[in-house]
Amino acid sequence: MSDTRHITLFHAPQTRSAGVLALVYELQADHELHVLNLRAGEQRQEAYLAINPMGKVPALRHGDALITEQPAVYQYLADLYPESGLAPQMGDPLRGPFLRWLAFYGSSFEPAVVDRAQKREPTPPSTCPYGDFDTMLRTLTDQLARGPYILGDKFTAADMLWGSALRWTTMFNLVPESPLIKDYIERVCSRPSFAQANAKDTELLAARGG
């Protein structure tokens, strides 16, 4: 493990790693970017598969530690900068809910959204990891209704994940943009860190010619 907080973010513009880039800016983290050109297939080349055998972004390197999977990346980064307050620490009653909503994204939300997008026949709730789409979404929106953030009044790295996720899923009509969800997206994604991440992605795309 590194004795510093310098990290490398493996990133590609206009992908799920955009929210992590925003978190890096939110934390003002000591970082470097390793940018992958997905159109050129760099995520499937041997060098990157040694980082993430799944060939996906984001991924994070901190010293000898490699972190993949979005919820783990968000948690690791926020825990690396505890003074930011973006990750409730052990002993805080919000620590469990913080971990719950990070895990819910990967275990329930994204699988449900992908199944819906692919028009797959739903499996019986008893054998489906997320039960059913409507229950999954209602579970999420019931929590958001307690707002303004997913843990209530406290803004955390979990909001960086959910704001980014809901922004792209509503953009592609994979999740209905209800007034509740729209307001939440605007509340989270209007933060300066998201503007910084968007500007960086625009710069990176321009540098490679779109």
Image (cartoon, rainbow, N blue to C red):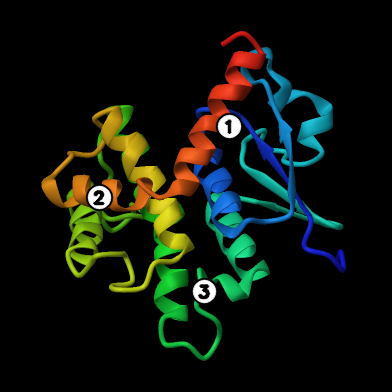
Q: CA distance from mark 1 to mark 2?
A: 43 Å
Residue 120 shows up from this direction: no
**Vertical placement of residue 30 versus 146, above or below:** above
| Residue 111: % across, % down | 39, 44
**Quadrant, the N terminus:** bottom right
State the residue position of label 2.
124
Among the two numbered marks 1 and 2 on one chain, the one whose residue lies closer to the N terminus: 2
**Does dot 2 land on a helix, a strand or a loop?**
loop
| Residue 73: % across, % down | 61, 55
The crowding category of the residue bearing disc 1, from other C-alpha atoms within 10 Å (few below 14, some 14 to 19, many at least 20), is some
Could you say which disc has been placed on residue 200 in the image? 1
**Does dot 1 land on a helix, a strand or a loop?**
helix
Q: CA distance from mark 3 to mark 1?
A: 25 Å
**Quadrant, the C terminus:** top right
Asked if residue 201 lies left or right of residue 128, the reply is right
Front disc: 2 or 3: 3
- Of the residues shown, which amino acid type is indicated by label 1? Lys
Q: Are marks 1 and 2 in contact (CB under 8 Å)?
A: no
The quarter of the displayed image where residue 131 is located: bottom left
Residue 126 shows up from this direction: yes
- Of the residues shown, which amino acid type is indicated by label 3? Gly
